[in-house]
Image (cartoon, rainbow, N blue to C red):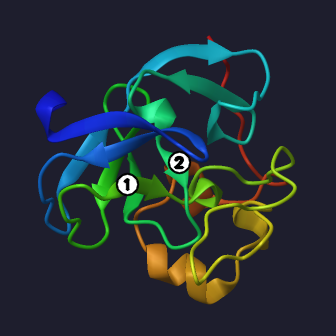
Amino acid sequence: MDFDIFVKVTNKGRGVFASRCFRQGETVVIGKRVKILPERTMHSFQMDFDLHIELDEPGRLINHSCSPNTGVRNNKFGGYDFVALVDIPAGTEITWDYATTEYSIIAFPKCICGSPQCRLNIRGFKSLPVQIKKKYGEFIADYLKLTSPETATRWPIK
């Protein structure tokens, strides 16, 4: 799969692009957990209400869009697979919605995705309208499918 994507610099920093066409439902990038972090960072991925991790590259380089072409699925490597939500033509930037893993986002005061459907502010899953949550269906972090942080059973961080 390494030859199926490439990284290049964009106006948002480095981004991941398709080297070939991907069909809806295909795994585009497999993001593997590199380490568990003691707290959230600008580049961390939320795996549970109190668990943030760092992914390997290229997963950590995939940029946000309010109308992304991939969704996330928890994987056996302790990270996320980025799965095509639509057919993705070769040369297209691979994007995902940060709100599909982050319950609450405080690091990005203004969205710069440039999508016609841009929400302007990325606030996290808890603030997503119901119709957007339904659009992503199963392609959100597993912990967001289960409960709210107020009632969550916390797993120990090891």
Residue 120: image quadrant is bottom right
Three-letter residue code for mark 1: Glu
Residues 146 and 85: in front is: 85
Report the side of 142 relative to 105 (left or right). left
Residue 30 is labelled as none
Residue 93 is labelled as 1
Q: Marks 1 and 2, how far apart in space?
A: 8 Å
Residue 90 percent coordinates (x, y): 18, 57
Residue 119 percent coordinates (x, y): 72, 76
Three-letter residue code for mark 2: Asn
Disc 1 vs disc 2: Cβ atoms closer than 8 Å?
Answer: yes
Residues 118 and 13: in front is: 13
Residue 49: image quadrant is top right
Q: Please tell me whether residue 108 is drawn above or below residue 70 in the rendered image.
A: above
Label 1 Cα crowd, 10 Å radius (few <14 / some 14-19 / many 20+): many
Task: Give the quadrant of the N terminus.
Answer: top left
Residue 63 is labelled as 2
The residue positioned 37% from the left and 53% from the top of the image is 94
Q: Please tell me whether residue 72 is drawn above or below residue 134 in the rendered image.
A: above
Report the side of 50 relative to 113 (left or right). right
Q: Considering the numbered disc 1 on the image, is that residue within a helix, a strand or a loop?
A: strand
Residue furthest to the bottom in view is 131
The residue positioned 87% from the left and 48% from the top of the image is 106
Label 2 Cα crowd, 10 Å radius (few <14 / some 14-19 / many 20+): many
Task: Give the quadrant of the C terminus.
Answer: top right
Q: How many badges with numbers are in the image?
A: 2
The residue positioned 71% from the left and 74% from the top of the image is 128
Q: Please tell me whether residue 135 is drawn above or below residue 150 in the rendered image.
A: below
The residue positioned 74% from the left and 62% from the top of the image is 111
Q: Please tell me whether residue 129 is drawn above or below residue 137 in the rendered image.
A: below
Residues 149 and 72: in front is: 72
Q: Considering the numbered disc 2 on the image, is that residue within a helix, a strand or a loop?
A: strand
